[in-house]
Amino acid sequence: MFEHLDDVVLRHEELLNELSSPEVLNDQALYRKLMKEQNDLNPVVEKYKEYKAIKDGIEDSLAILENEKDEDMRELAKEELSDCRARIEGVEKELEILLLPKDPNDSKNVIVEIRGGAGGDEAALFAADLFRMYCRYAERRNWKIDMMNSNENGLGGFKEVVFMINGEGAYSVLKYESGVHRVQRIPVTESGGRIHTSTATVAIMPEAEEVDVQIDMNDCKFDVFRASGNGGQCVNTTDSAVRLTHIPTGIVISCQDEKSQLKNKDKALKVLRSRLYELECAKAHDAEAEARRSQVGTGDRSEKIRTYNYPQSRVTDHRIKLTSHRLSEIMDGDLDEVIQALIAADQAAKLSRMESEA
């Protein structure tokens, strides 16, 4: 069933030898490339070796039962056979999941855009709550947060906030967060005690490298203006903020969180590169047949994906019908329960599709 993985094991052994050779050690770019390939193969090779050991255990036990006359030995073989048969199905499933086609963006950092939607000031406050939730999640994983741009509403909320999360595999777990998030609660601005429903939109984009997207600077128009908000002496006194307009697409990006105009320009280009890369990825996804799409959405900004109900302390993910009554923990960044369920649902959908196509 998995015999072709013998070639993967051989390639893994070749990589170990190559990584210790002086030629590779002296070429850092090649070393990083081979190290990444080895790291990608490690879990597959380890799981395949476990699978082969179980298969060997089954064959050995059957051989003993066929040839051995000693009852004690036969009893031990029966126990070993039962144990191996109980384990092999689960290991096969884990191996199948490891062999699913990988998203080439999974290892990348992410740029996160959160915008307040329907609900006015309450939507902006909810956007700030989501920003804090993702920051706390990143902190739990020792990932780095880099602010790109923010537009506050004066009450502690964000009309818009853009930031980068730097961490290995950030996109692989956060890509399921794109979409419309809905909150149901009594707003701090509500004097009558009525529950309101507000929304915020989250967009998760993989950080695009220059090799992923080439930007023609002739297509870019830069305007500088005086930054607003908190930020020290330079803010409000120098034209450090940058507004970038990409003429072919009409995309407009503002960055003002850095005191340096040059740094804000670099950040604006980084966001533009990721936006253009996201557009290209969206075109590729749209070109796929409906039957080949995953059950779990990972990019449609208009899709209502999750509701946060404060009176009932309930979080519901509508894509996989998951309900959790750990709202306070989730809003404090403990997202593992939700994200792992989404990953599992996505993997199950891909496995089912592969089996139906086989």
Image (cartoon, rainbow, N blue to C red):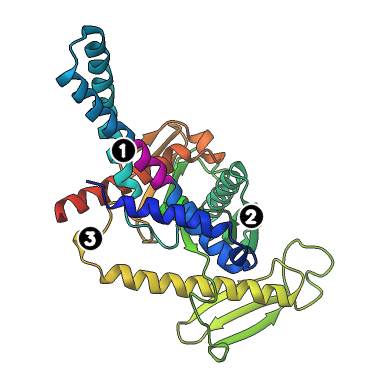
161 relative to 197 in the view: left or right: right
The range drawn in magenta is 43-50
**Residue 186 x, y percent position in the rendering:** 50, 40
Mark 3–mark 2 distance (CA, rounded to whole Å): 34 Å
Give the residue drawn at x 57%, y 62%.
32
Left or right: 175 with respect to 71? right
Where does residue 358 sit, x and y in percent of width and height?
15, 54
For the image, the number of numbered tags is 3
| Dot 3 alpha-carbon crowd within 10 angstroms: few under 14, some 14 to 19, many 20 or more | few
Q: What's the CA distance linking mark 2 and mark 1?
A: 42 Å
Q: Residue furthest bottom?
A: 218
Characterize the magenta stretch by its predominant secondary structure.
helix
- Residue 130 percent coordinates (x, y): 53, 49
CA distance separating discs 1 and 3: 31 Å
58 w.r.t. 1: above or below: above
| Helix, strand or loop under label 2 | strand
Res. 296 mark:
none
Residue 55 belongs to the span the image colors magenta = no
Label 2 crowd bin: few (<14), some (14–19), many (20+), radius 10 Å: some
Other residues around mark 1 within 10 Å, as few (<14) / some (14–19) / many (≥20):
some
> Which SS class for mark 3?
helix
Left/right placement of residue 91 relative to residue 200 reads left
Residue identified by numbered label 1:
52
Looking at the image, tell me whether mark 3 or mark 2 is earlier in sequence order. Answer: 2
The residue tagged 2 is 145
Q: Which amino acid, by three-letter code, is at mark 1?
A: Lys
